[in-house]
Amino acid sequence: MAGRLILIGGFFSGSLPVAQAAIIDVTEEKQRSEYIGYIMFFVSLGYVVGPLFGGYLSDPALVPPGSICKCRLSL
């Protein structure tokens, strides 16, 4: 399990520079800073919402029994 998580983390660790390069290649010069700002906003939002969502799912008293099973099957 840990090996899979490390492998998945390795695949996605370079996704931010790739996304920024794609935005730089596709957008006009006037809009680049705006779209790069959107990327950074959603990355920051993920840093906040991800642990909150994970913490919520880790407490079995707060989550209905069927949803935990569905989440674990999706991994």
Image (spheres, rainbow, N blue to C red):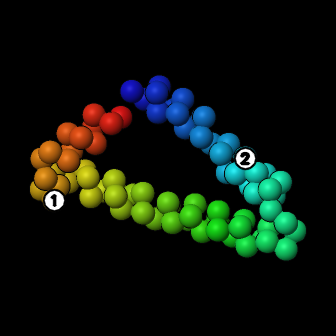
Residue type (three-letter) at the residue carrying disc 2 = Val
Marked residue nearer the N-terminal end (2 or 1): 2
**What crowding class fits label 1: few (fewer than 14 Cα within 10 Å), some (14-19), or many (20 or more)?**
few
Can residue 68 be seen here? The reply is: yes
Which label sits in the foreground, 2 or 1? 2
**Residue beneath label 1, please?**
62
Residue type (three-letter) at the residue carrying disc 1 = Leu
Look at the image and tell me in which quarter the N terminus lies. Answer: top left
**What crowding class fits label 2: few (fewer than 14 Cα within 10 Å), some (14-19), or many (20 or more)?**
few
Residue 33 lies, with reference to residue 15, above or below; the image says below
Q: Position of residue 71 (x, y in %)?
A: 28, 42
Rendered image: mark on residue 35: none
> Residue drawn 50% across and 60% down?
47
**Residue beneath label 2, please?**
18
Q: Position of residue 45 (x, y in %)?
A: 51, 66
Determine whether, in the image, residue 5 is placed left or right of residue 13: left
